Image (cartoon, coloured by chain):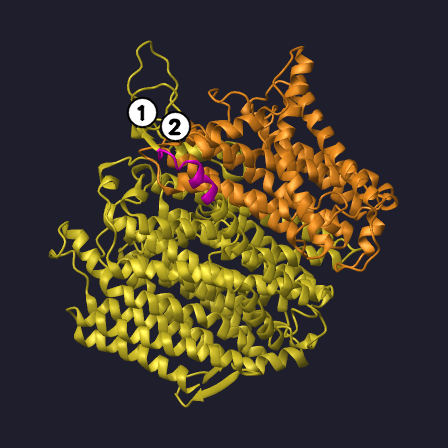
Amino acid sequence: MLILFATLVLLLGGAFASLFLRRGKWALYVPACALALAALAGIGFCAYALLQPSGLQASLPLPLPLGACLFSVDHISALFLIPVFLLSGLGGVLMPFRVRALEWASSGVPGVTVKGGDIQHGRHGFFYCILSAAMVLVLSASDAVFFLIAWEIMSLTPFFLISPQDKDSKERYAVWIYLVAAHLGALVLLLLFADMSVQADSTSFAVMESFARQSGWQGAGLLFVLALVGFGVKAGLAPLHMWMPEAHASAPGHVAVLLSGTMLNLGIYGIVRLLTLLAPDAFTALAPDRFWWSYLLMGIGAFSAVFGILLALAQSDMKRTLAYSSAENMGLICLALGAALLAGARGADKACVLLLAGAVLHMWNHSLFKSLLFLGANAVKESTHVTTIRHLGGLQKRIPLTGGCMALGCAAIAAVPPLNGFMSELLMYLGLAFGSEATRGTENPLIFWGLFFVVGSVAGLALFAFTRMFGLIFLGTPRSPESLEAKEPDRVLQSGMLLLAVLCLGVSLAAPWLFSLVEHSLRATLLSAAGTGTTDLSFAHELMYWYALAALVLLALFSLAWLVRRSASWKSGPGESPTWDCGYRYPSARMQYSGGSFSLSLALVLRPLLRPMLRIPAIRDLFPQRQHAVMSSPDWPSALWERLLFNPVSALAEWTKNLQSGLVNVYVLYIFIALVAALTWALGWS
Amino acid sequence: MSARILLSLFFVLLSVLLAPLLNGVINRVKAIVAGRKGRPLLQLYYDLFKLMHKNPVYSHTSTWFFRAAPAAGLAATIFALCILPFGPFAALCSFPGDFLLLAGLFALVRFSLILAALDTGSAFEGMGAAREAMFSALAEPILLLSLVVLAYHAGDYSLSNMIGCLHPDLWAANRPFFVMIAIAFFLLLLPENCRIPVDDPNTHLELTMIHEVMILDHSGPDLAFLEYAASLKLWIFCMLISGVLMPSSLTALLAESPPVDGGPVIAFGDIVLATLHTLLPVFGIAVLVGLVESLMARLRLERVPQVLTLAACFAVFAALVLWR
């Protein structure tokens, strides 16, 4: 535990050091070093914690008004801590260089910072470190009040990070939306934990767990729904995702890595943690009257996955595509959790282990490839100043390294074997298949097959969305002068992307060992009640080895085919010519397929789900003038929220302003009415 | 190396050799129905041979994606062939969960093909890529659902046991299920292999083309690889259907034989018989595809999703029949 405290001290030290240094490059280098060191120490700590048979506990004698400073790191926390440490370290190292690039970008000339475009270095470094520290605290807190404090710090700090330059009205809007959403979520969590601590008469998680075992919660279902809403907002599950596309699309690369790669995971962590608090043996023996919990989780997961990917494939902005696909991936994880609950309750132990392991591995993988993609998008934005797909193209020839890394990330997120995204979805598929087999004779196979179908269609649509994104941005011919002049980012960002790409590859090759690790730690925590050795998963290990081997076989076959091809076309070498465009002599970049045309036909086929808006002007005159056709795919779940909740609330708030008229006689009237009402109440009561 | 592995290897090679013949059969059927004499049965072999000796021409726009995609597609398709059982004979690599790898490998082929098409920067190929991505995105879950239902039926998760070891009695007991799965596979075969009601393999300049228009810019050995991979994919689908439709009495013999030598010896005559028993339906399906191509017009593009919906309905009903 000392190591954990040491990392926290490092992070806080880095934060305050950068606050005192205020300006200049050291205000960023110091926190960067602190973050990197903390990451190294933290990953070592996670490895140590995973090797321990049970969780590690500690407490600090800090005087909190309520609750206590209780730390506890069990295997679940450790599994979630790994990406936090990894990505905060990586983001921290990138931070000074990204901030510099942002400042240069606003002046337009490298090496020059203009007044107004500069970033307050001290502030930025401070909040970056604080955010990392808060995430570590959230994952290690074992007391409701302490957890909420850490959660609130973690929710607040991105407010200061998303728009470091604070000059774009769109970015300000994004930040504002983020703040509101984060607080609505936190409000729900406050209610949840308040009720729980009153019932259990303690704020400690350990006491709550034993309370759940002994007497059980009253209104556990309501508590579960509150947790799902509160943490679902943070995880960006689909109907609650309003803040995500705005915030993630606006944040600079190193911040988006933290927001998308790690903070979303904490929402999932919250759901898992609350499940263990509400029903300690949820994953092995869920009470039959609580089956709807699993249905709810599966439903929200499936909805989030499908809508996330559908909205992702219709976006015209690269970063928004990535942001919506986060909703998809979080949905898949949530779906796997729900299915694991059901499988565990039905005694399908194998399926439960596979689904949970799939969820954890997918969480890791998502952290890796989504960070990779956000960094790549950042590199594109830095060199071209645009992120609209329509204005990009042909970048692969100009920035091959970024392109290669992005291609790998896209293949991984589209679940193409043998990359890591496929490995984790494979576990989910297998878990669902086993679930259907183990529940033969009940109605559950239909549910598992339905989920199987959903996961399959999400994988297919993800392939569509990411071949579209990569193909249109990096391949073909440049569609604008900006993309013609794209340059590779600095060495640090390049090596950051390379590191993540290597990690993606490494995870896919090391999947068998990672699976064993995850399985081991799940058995020690979530599945401890099932007892060890009850289920034989040797086939799954064998399978994972086969799949890791498949990567090598594929590589061998590919090299063979490549050699055959080389020897065949060896004689006089390949020729070069323009792209053949069916006899038309002057193809131009504008004739290429664009983002809108790529997704149009699918958007039309899936019209009921996606609700695309098309406005194609009709030609009426003999000599039509220049006209514009508009196609957009509005985020209708968010629009629905706006119509049903936000607009009425803001209308009400707007209306209540009328009460403050500023006329003294009206205020006297208010006082009179209040007096009469109070008297009536008092007299009537007695 | 045990006899079993040698046998599997032999069947992989046999598939690799025979696959281009399917196109010849389909074209011959179409020619006969149309009253023509038709191309030689081995036309695709000649084409491939000719293309392998040509120099490729690359567009200025294209990058290494364009050059690597055909080889990657071919490698993935051949690998898919290695996990596919040949009739009652187990696949070369058979392990639990390999049916997911089959779907995954198709995704890999698609991923590389779409990127290669977009790499040329041509409007036509972009159009083809968008359509291919769309139809296969809709087809993938149906294929997965059919496969997982088959796995549920077999209680086993390797393709070799799912479709290779169907005992005739077992088959007869669940006849509607297998027929419906086979129909779903056949309806998937049409769009996945760009066959007529969905796509026309003969022309590439029509605006409704999908696969052919995607490979418009490929030439020489690259084109040969793509054509060859396409014929292998058709072979894989035909094998899937024949595996579902054709139970084999040889099953019992093979299922009980341990993976190492020393099991019951399989007679040479049995092997030949089983091979013919597998090859005949495969070519029968090719004839069926040829008949469909001759008798149907190509559907309008917006009606193609209806074909896929029909396939999904058959898969879902098969699942319901099995579950009841």
Q: Which residues are magenta?
A: A562-574
Marks 1 and 2 sit apart, C-alpha to C-alpha, by: 9 Å
| Quadrant of the rendered image containing residue B126 | top left
Q: Residue at (54%, 25%) from the top-left corner?
A: B301
Judging by colour alone, the chain drawn in orange in this rendered image is B
Q: Position of residue A583 (x, y in %)?
A: 36, 18
Q: Nearer the viewer, residue A304 or A296?
A: A304
Residue hosting label 1: A587
Confirm or deny contact between disc 1 and disc 2 (CB under 8 A). Answer: yes
Can residue A277 be spotted in the picture? no
Look at the picture and state if A672 lies above or below B7: below
Circle 1 packing at 10 Å, graded few (<14), some (14-19), many (20+), is some
Mark carried by residue B123: 2
Q: Is residue A273 above or below residue A374?
A: below
Left or right: where A312 falls relative to B311:
left
Q: Nearer the viewer, residue A196 or B123?
A: B123
Q: Is residue A431 visible?
A: yes
Point out residue B30 in the picture as x, y percentages from the top left corner.
65, 18
Residue at the (12%, 57%) spot, across then down: A113
Q: Quadrant of the N terminus of chain B?
A: bottom right
Query: Which chain gets the yellow colouring?
Result: A
- Callout 2, which amino acid? Ala
Is A555 rendered above or below residue B17?
Answer: below
Q: Which residue is at a point 68% across and 35% down the rendered structure image?
A: B238
Q: Chain of mark 1?
A: A
Image position of A296 with respect to A281: above or below: above
Circle 2 sits in a helix, a strand or a loop, which is it? helix
Choose top left, top right, bottom left or bottom right for residue A605: top right
Single out the residue that lies furthest toward the bottom: A61
The residue type indicated by label 1 comes to: Pro
- Please determine if labels 1 and 2 lie on a single subunit: no
